[in-house]
Image (tube, grey):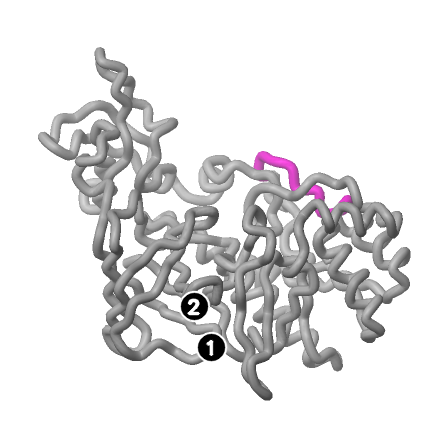
Amino acid sequence: MSGGVDSSVAALLLKGQGLDVSGAYMKNWINEDGVVGNCPWREDIEDARRVAEQVGIPFQVVNLMGDYREKVVQYLLDGYARGLTPNPDIMCNREIKFGVFRSWALANGFTAVATGHYARRRETAPGAVELLEGADANKDQSYFLCLLGQEQVRRARFPIGDLQKPEIRRIAAQAGLATAAKKDSQGICFIGDVRMGDFLRAYVPDRPGPILRASDGRELGRHRGLHYFTLGQRRGIGVPSNAENERYVVVGKRAADTALLVEFDHPDAPGLFQTEVRVHSLSWTGEPVTAATRLEGRVRYRDPRVGLSFEPEGDRAARVRFEAPQRALASGQVLALYNGPRLLGGGVYV
């Protein structure tokens, strides 16, 4: 229970089904280093506790701060320091919610972990399950679950996956839950409303370098560090538009000389669009895809599913060819793989 309305209603629905339910808040981060931003963990704990009392279930706080710093924060910082664009929310689900926390739950006598994700879980045969997109297309969060393994999926429950967000609010209000009107959380997974730039500035040393135009190598300015930028970024580059008011966009990062590569934001900007990528660290929510086939993919959260051809290269890597060029696929980001609304798994862009 995160202290938000979605996990609050998830607990209420499970209790209503007659299940033996306990609520737990994962204490992952307390802004102990004074990073700029709002990290309302005390308020979230109290909101979760109040809802648990209203629902009539036990509640406890589970301290996972050490694991979170090691498995999510360090992954985030290491990735940016290497010029990648990591996804801490996906890693938090795999390593913490359905990783360390799941292990804690099983060790303490629980059989499954339920969350407020907008995703659907369906049993297809004894011991076999599949994940589907959430029924609310505007809130679907299946993308963030794409690196879960099969055992993690078997132990997962998503009670609100068949509902629309307005219905969630209505159920919470009718039950008088303390979180019924609470705004949805923003920012880094379980860290709070912290700007990524501020977070990185606090933990990753600056490594200045040149800003170069990709097409001719002309230096346009200087930057503080490649970790502040990602492929496809338009704002905050520090290079003004030209006389025709054409804006620059990031099309590459060169670690050897810490050069930030930019070009005018045109469809033919070199490096901005890709039709073919390689992915590694493949993970499957069900049976692995081991033969070349046509699938669909979500190249980032909130993007629509797009057609692609999938060609395995060993156990955990593949070559992906998109049916239409895709914009700004940054190394370190995650491609979620689907067969229609069914989530198959995902991999990380090389």
Q: Residue at x 27, y 15 (%)?
A: 245
In the rendering, which numbered label is found on residue 345? 2
Q: CB atoms at circles 1 and 2 under 8 Å apart? A: yes
Residue 337 falls in image quadrant:
bottom left
* Circle 2 Cα neighbour tier, 10 Å, few/some/many (<14 / 14–19 / ≥20): many
Residue 42 inside the magenta-drawn segment: yes
| Residue 316 % position (x, y) | 32, 73
Magenta stretch bounds: 35-43
What kind of residue is marked 2? Gly
To which residue does mark 1 refer?
A: 286
Q: Is residue 153 left or right of residue 167?
A: left
Looking at the rendered structure, the secondary structure element under dot 2 is strand
Q: Amino acid at mark 1?
A: Gly
Residue 330 is a magenta residue = no
Q: Is residue 42 left or right of residue 267?
A: right
* Residue 238 screen position, x and y as percent: 32, 23
